[in-house]
Amino acid sequence: MTLTASVDTTLTEIISGTTPGAACSPDLVAKPWVFDLQPPSYGPGSSMGDVIPAGSPRQGTLPAFYREASSEELDRRIRSAKETLGDRLVILGHFYQRDEVVAYADYVGDSFQLATAAKARTDAEAIVFCGVHFMAETADLLSTPEQSVILPNLAAGCSMADMANIDQVEECWEQLTELFGSEADATGRVPVIPVTYMNSSAALKGFCGRNGGIVCTSSNAETVLKWAFERGQRVLFFPDQHLGRNTAKAMGVPLEQMPMWNPNKPFGGNDALALQSSQVILWHGFCSVHKRFTVDQIERARAEHPGVRVIVHPECPMPVVDAADEYGSTDYIRKAIEAAPAGTTFAIGTEINLVQRLAAEHPEHTIFCLDPVVCPCSTMYRIHPGYLAWVLDSLLDGVVLNQISVSDDVAAPARLALERMLAAKPPIAAGA
Ligand code: 13P
Ligand code: SF4
């Protein structure tokens, strides 16, 4: 197997001193199973210190055979299982997965594309999702009851998704209902429409389904907010404050009409007046990977590479999005690079696995990550060929390991919120 864009290799070289550079944690060169049994941290790197919520599924010990197998042995096993299982198996890989895993994916894409791929492959008995927990839950919601969705490592969560839990959101909703009531106005718009980012638990998607709300991804957030404003006087947006703020600002919502909701304070830490005039109430959540990007990095990139095109993900803080030339979802970034004339220089503000892969796939351009410190998403990092070989070998034995299954009471309303999203207009290009 030839890998041209392995972040694992880059990290190993940086940490051993054979390549200059900096990594956010030396632990990132360790194999992920070292961290599976070390609660409560999510793992090394950008999400270090994030506490795994009490209810999160935990990964048990990966059998010694898979921990000790060479990469050649794992490669042989994964390829052989894929061949034997044929169309009964589909492997989905998010853009942020390590190259060593992407090599086996039948579909590689952003969270929206992978959700639609999961829905389309009704012929596959097993959907192995190389991504994080909320993505596998979404695949389970959109697939048929006969299909099994498998997350190779249960410790692959998302620290941002875990910043809003169902109890906190229910409590927030109670307070908002107390303040605004629930009656529609003369135009038929209800006081609040809940909108959850795809990066959230199925329980929150279910909450949106039950309360007239909807799901969005970073590629359709503006379309979804328009949908919500047609039906509501204001939006409660969770869990990512940055995606909510950046999208609403681009649509002309003034910043002073976007109060932040801190779940640990009464009325989210707001006075009733500020909430009365709000258009978008932003949950106090963020992505620890995208929070690393700064305006200073953009200024440095422009000073060192005159003419550089700076594109960032909308999970970055607002000053970074404002300072960039463009922003958009992972797929927007990929397409912008594909469409550019040869010889373009890009500074990209998103997860390093995708940036390094795009750089390898496009030698006609110069592509680098805005953040000079190599710091992959520490939960995406939890998926490794060792776990993939383990769950595939088990499938060959007729055993479904690490199945992600959303309970029926949550699934029905969560599916409704997702179907509303899929029925909303197709994703639009993000703004420049
Ligand atoms: P996309 O929706 O662009 O795939 O992003 C998912 C994600 O986790 C970004 O941090
Ligand atoms: Fe979650 Fe951020 Fe990792 Fe995406 S990059 S999975 S939002 S922690």
Image (cartoon, rainbow, N blue to C red):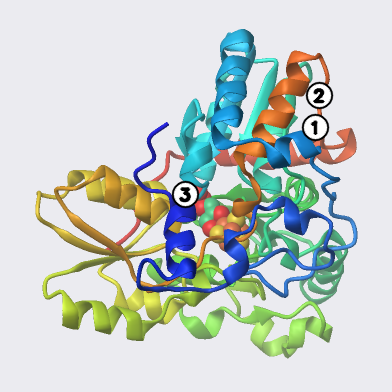
The residue carrying pointer 2 sits among few (fewer than 14), some (14 to 19) or many (20 or more) residues within 10 Å by Cα, namely some
Mark 2 within 8 Å of ligand 2, using the beta carbon: no
Which residue sits at x=80%, y=14%? 397
In the rendered view, does 56 fall on the left or right side of 414? right
Give the mark toward the camera: 3 or 2.
2
Q: Mark 2 points at which residue?
A: 400
Mark 1 in CB contact with mark 2 (< 8 angstroms): yes
Q: Mark 1 points at which residue?
A: 403
Residue 233, by quadrant, is bottom right
Which residue sits at x=52%, y=86%? 256
Mark 1 within 8 Å of ligand 2, using the beta carbon: no
Is tag 3's residue or tag 1's residue first in the polypeptide sequence? 3
State the separation of the CA atoms marked 1 and 2.
6 Å
Q: Where is residue 81 in the image (x, y as percent from the top left)?
A: 63, 17
Assign the N terminus to one quadrant of the image: top left
Q: Can residue 46 be seen in this view?
A: no
Residue 333 vs 74, above or below: the answer is below
Q: Name the residue under label 3.
A: 220
Residue 398 vs 351, above or below: the answer is above
- The residue tagged with tag 3: helix, strand or loop? loop
- The residue tagged with tag 1: helix, strand or loop? loop
Assign the C terminus to one quadrant of the image: bottom left
> What residue type is disc 1 on?
Gln
Is tag 3's residue or tag 2's residue first in the polypeptide sequence? 3
